[in-house]
Image (tube, rainbow, N blue to C red):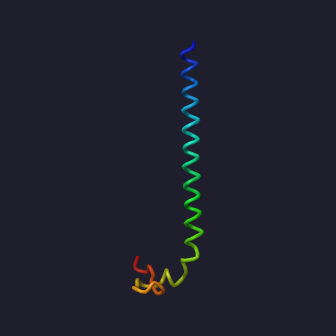
């Protein structure tokens, strides 16, 4: 009886640690995605999407891609 109680405790502990670790990973991923969207949204405009690549950063675009 004691062995099954210990195994249930280990199982629940492992499950809790796994869920906690997964939530931390999801929160970090969400933080990075939100940061990328906030920082990058201002840099993408109509000219960037419709201009050809250029050596000058002001005129560069991604039209062929």
Q: Position of residue 13 (x, y in %)?
A: 57, 31
Q: Picture coordinates of residue 31 (x, y %)?
A: 58, 58
Residue at 54% across, 38% down: 18
User: Residue 35 in the image: x percent, y percent?
Assistant: 58, 64
Above/below status of 13 relative to 41? above
Q: Is residue 3 above or below residue 9?
A: above
Figure quadrant of the N terminus: top right
State left or right for residue 58 relative to residue 37: left
Where is 27 relative to 47, above or below?
above
Q: Quadrant of the C terminus?
A: bottom left
> What residue lies at 57% left-to-right and 47% top-to-bottom?
24
The location of residue 41, given as percent across then percent down, is 57, 73
Q: Residue furthest top?
A: 1
Circle count: 0
Identify the residue shown where x is 54% and y is 77%.
44
Q: Is residue 25 left or right of residue 60?
A: right
Q: Quadrant of residue 45?
A: bottom right
């Amino acid at each position: 009886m004691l062995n099954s109680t210990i195994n249930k405790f280990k199982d629940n502990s492992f499950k809790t640690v796994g869920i906690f670790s997964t939530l931390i990973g999801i929160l970090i991923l969400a933080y990075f995605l939100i940061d990328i969207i906030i920082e990058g949204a201002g840099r993408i405009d109509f000219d960037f999407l419709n201009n050809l690549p250029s050596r000058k950063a002001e005129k560069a675009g991604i039209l062929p891609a």
